[in-house]
Amino acid sequence: MRASTSNTLQDRVSDAATARRLVVTWQHPIERTISPVGMLSFDGHGYRFHYLRKALQVNGFRPFLGFPDLHGQYTSDTLFPLFAQRAMTPRRPDFTRWVKRLGLPDDASPWEQITRSGGHRQGDTIQLFPVPTVADGRLECDFLVHGMRHIADRPTTVVGDVVTPTRDQVERQLATLAPGDELRLHDEPSNTINPLAILTTTRDNMPLGWVPDLLVEEIHRIPDHHRARVTALAVNGPEAGWHLRLLAHLSLLVPDGFDVFADERWQPNTS
């Protein structure tokens, strides 16, 4: 796989993948709860996968196909099949359209694709989330705005005002957004499902969706997280499906020594 990759692409992937990790989550097929169970990483040369200690406490979870040992550490020179099949081959006629929706170039690698898309497949129980990088006093992370199909016709409190956007209003806002446009984050403590929920809105505070739940606990650890810089990376039409409507980038000042996913729950479950 590496032999067929151009030097330019390899350099870009290596730079982007330095300390790059993806949290592997599993959704309970009945309860619909989403739980982090593993970590997939790429150092520019090879891939690693291990389960998290917290996976042992996830109700109903069983080891993934190809990774039978919950205490093992797996390595490979190529992307593991379970994850590689979540990327699209360049031989597909719709490949260019697909990577454009992800804000990627035509030579996007499978790793770049799953990092942006979350490896989502219809009816699947596995999702991938990029671990934010922390360098030079800033946290940086791309994220797909979640819950966009549910935001319309839902009373939502933003900066003390109750807003109930219609489906048409949401679509009009998305139609006017372009890559590079500023977005905003707002805490939503009144959220009955997750009091730590963080809304993603337009500059004029029109709700569009939410920051993924996986990130909100880490963001709330950061003082002045409401000062985050958030910009649109890719904006897609209805044909892309709600999952890929809006990809955003988050940049946020963090205290000295700050790290993400560093407590006991996130430690590898290796022997």
Image (cartoon, grey):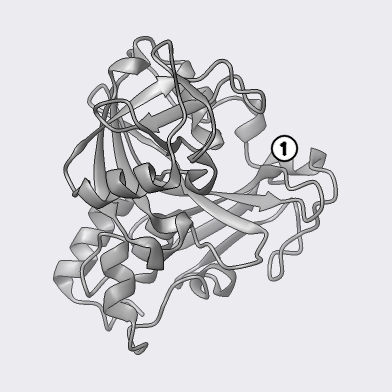
Residue ID at (31%, 64%): 101
Q: Quadrant of the N terminus?
A: bottom left
Residue ID at (45%, 71%): 77
Residue ID at (34%, 31%): 206
The one nearer the camera, 77 or 152, is: 152
Q: Position of residue 242 (x, y in %)?
A: 46, 56
The reply to whether residue 237 is in sight is yes
Q: In the visual, does 197 lie left or right of 1?
A: right
Residue ID at (68%, 70%): 66
Mark count: 1
Q: Secondary structure at mark 1?
A: helix
The reply to whether residue 111 is in sight is no
- Residue where numbered disc 1 is placed: 54
Q: Which image quadrant for residue 181? A: top left
Q: Residues within 10 Å of mark 1 (few under 14, many from 20)?
A: some
Q: Position of residue 251 (x, y in %)?
A: 27, 30
Q: Position of residue 211 (x, y in %)?
A: 45, 35
Q: Identify the residue at the far right of this view.
A: 60
**Identity, as a three-letter code, of the amino acid under mark 1:** Lys
Q: Position of residue 162 (x, y in %)?
A: 46, 19
Give the answer, above or below, for where 226 lies relative to 95.
above
Q: In the visual, does 128 lie left or right of 124?
A: left
The one nearer the camera, 66 or 110, is: 110
The one nearer the camera, 73 or 119, is: 119
Give the answer, above or below, for where 204 lies relative to 31.
above
Give the answer, above or below, for where 109 lies relative to 42.
below
